[in-house]
């Protein structure tokens, strides 16, 4: 009896201490939620971390902290917390959904696929949690959904997007068929299925784009893709109209600006193209092709210094971008800066030794500075690499 009493005396204080730590963890968690709702993310993060310090197995605190990490744009930290929480409780539907969506955003498609497939085997249950749906084909997140509203359809949608991302268009269409069947009034699902169908060269893709527009008349992705379809038939005016509508629907989508600028270049509407490339560069300044194309528009408008600047920006972003080297060389040659132009053409040849146009243009620049031997050599190299030549120029450059 005495030994039993001693053991109870020892165990009891530890039990009380554990209960106190759990209560303290709950208090930190509650305060963290309050801070989170007030937008005080740093405070919330600190409080959730304190909660876990008191009770390291507290899955709710891991989930809450992961949510804050996502809002703070720290996806790797969020992924770690979701994973730890699921190790304690593997069948948490909302947490598994959050991790699957995050893996998708991180382009970890195979891991995301495993999570989404598991979600199809779990009951959704009741929840008040709000999830923000993210389109895979445009930036940002759009309308809200809950785990109670067509969530299974959204899981199928994600699985379809994953298969599209890994170039399995047939499987993508099958998954998206299920999403459409479960939520036939969701425009995004028709758009995603149409894109998968396009990858499979399925001509019914256009029907899905039209259905999406019937449900959501200003759907920018549907309008954009219909415009591309129109352009393939040579109907540039109608394509431009569709792209303009897409831009009005979502002014932060990059592709419609680039497509419209291209069609405007074809129609010799250089100022219109320049306006579109200006906007495109506001959205993405790190794509050398946009800088190159804006340089082309400026060159057509006889803004040689502006074109030179844009080609230089393209080169700085991608030093091996041979088109930018040649185009900048052309701008220099147009200003009779032939020695500098030769340097740019030479750079293009270093990066692409079979670039016939670079040899041809360098030959002309060499001729302008009276280096006839070099000019003749380059003209022969241009011909070797299938660059069309004017026979009269060849006879003038190669006199022997």
Image (cartoon, grey):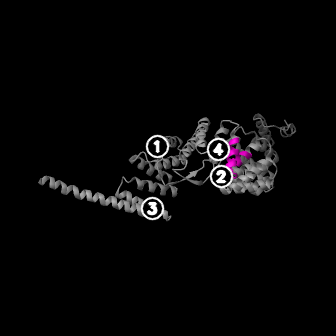
Residue 382 is covered by the magenta coloring: no
* Quadrant hosting residue 183: top right
Q: In the rendered image, is residue 14 in sight?
A: yes
Disc 2 marks which residue? Answer: 316
Observer-side mark, 3 or 2, equals: 3
The answer to which of marks 4 and 1 sits earlier in the sequence is 1
Start and end of the magenta stretch? 207-227
Looking at the image, which residue is at 45% across and 64% down? 34
Image location (x, y in percent) of residue 334: 81, 52
Give the Cα separation between the discs numbered 3 and 4. Answer: 37 Å
Density class for disc 2 (Cα within 10 Å; few <14, some 14-19, many ≥20) is few
Give the Cα separation between the discs numbered 3 and 2. Answer: 46 Å
Residue 216 is covered by the magenta coloring: yes
| Secondary element type, mark 1 | loop
Give the Cα separation between the discs numbered 1 and 3. Answer: 27 Å
Looking at the image, which residue is at 82% across and 47% down? 368
Density class for disc 4 (Cα within 10 Å; few <14, some 14-19, many ≥20) is many
Looking at the image, which residue is at 54% across and 46% down? 104
**Nearer-the-camera pick, 176 or 134:** 176
Q: Is 234 displayed left or right of 63 in the figure?
A: right
Disc 4 marks which residue? Answer: 190
| Secondary element type, mark 3 | helix
Disc 3 marks which residue? Answer: 33
The answer to which of marks 1 and 3 sits earlier in the sequence is 3
Q: In this view, does 166 lie above or below 79?
A: above
Observer-side mark, 3 or 4, equals: 4
């Amino acid at each position: 009896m005495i030994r039993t009493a001693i053991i109870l005396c020892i165990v009891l204080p530890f039990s009380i201490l554990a209960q106190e730590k759990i209560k303290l963890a709950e208090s930190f968690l509650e305060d963290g939620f309050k801070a989170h709702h007030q937008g005080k993310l740093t405070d919330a993060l600190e409080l959730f971390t304190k909660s876990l310090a008191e009770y390291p197995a507290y899955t709710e605190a891991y989930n809450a902290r992961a949510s804050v990490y996502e809002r703070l744009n720290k996806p790797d930290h969020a992924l770690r917390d979701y994973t730890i929480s699921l190790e304690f409780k593997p069948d948490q539907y909302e947490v598994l959904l959050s991790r699957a969506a995050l893996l998708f955003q991180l382009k970890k498609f195979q891991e995301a696929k495993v999570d989404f497939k598991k979600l199809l085997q779990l009951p959704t249950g009741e929840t008040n949690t709000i999830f923000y749906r993210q389109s895979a084909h445009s930036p940002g997140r759009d309308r809200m959904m809950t785990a109670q509203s067509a969530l299974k359809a959204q899981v199928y949608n994600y699985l379809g997007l994953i298969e599209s991302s890994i170039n399995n268009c047939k499987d993508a269409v099958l998954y998206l068929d299920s999403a459409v069947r479960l939520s036939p009034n969701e425009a995004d699902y028709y758009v995603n299925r149409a894109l998968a169908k396009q990858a499979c060269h399925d001509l019914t893709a256009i029907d899905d784009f039209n259905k999406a527009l019937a449900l959501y008349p200003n759907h920018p992705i549907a309008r954009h893709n219909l415009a591309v379809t129109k352009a393939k038939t040579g109907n540039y005016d109608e394509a431009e109209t569709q792209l303009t509508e897409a831009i009005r629907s979502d002014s932060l989508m990059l592709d419609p600006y680039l497509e419209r600028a291209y069609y405007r270049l074809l129609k010799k509407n250089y100022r219109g193209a320049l306006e579109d490339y200006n906007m495109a560069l506001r959205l993405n300044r790190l794509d050398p092709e946009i800088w190159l194309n804006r340089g082309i528009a400026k060159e057509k408008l006889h803004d040689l210094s502006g074109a030179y600047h844009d080609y230089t920006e393209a080169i700085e972003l991608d030093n091996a971008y041979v088109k930018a080297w040649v185009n900048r060389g052309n701008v220099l040659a147009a200003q009779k800066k032939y020695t500098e132009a030769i340097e740019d053409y030479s750079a293009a040849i270093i990066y692409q030794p079979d670039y016939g146009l670079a040899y041809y243009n360098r030959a002309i620049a060499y001729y302008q500075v009276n280096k006839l031997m070099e000019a003749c050599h380059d003209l022969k190299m241009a011909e070797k690499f299938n660059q069309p030549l004017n026979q009269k120029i060849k006879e003038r450059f190669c006199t022997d």
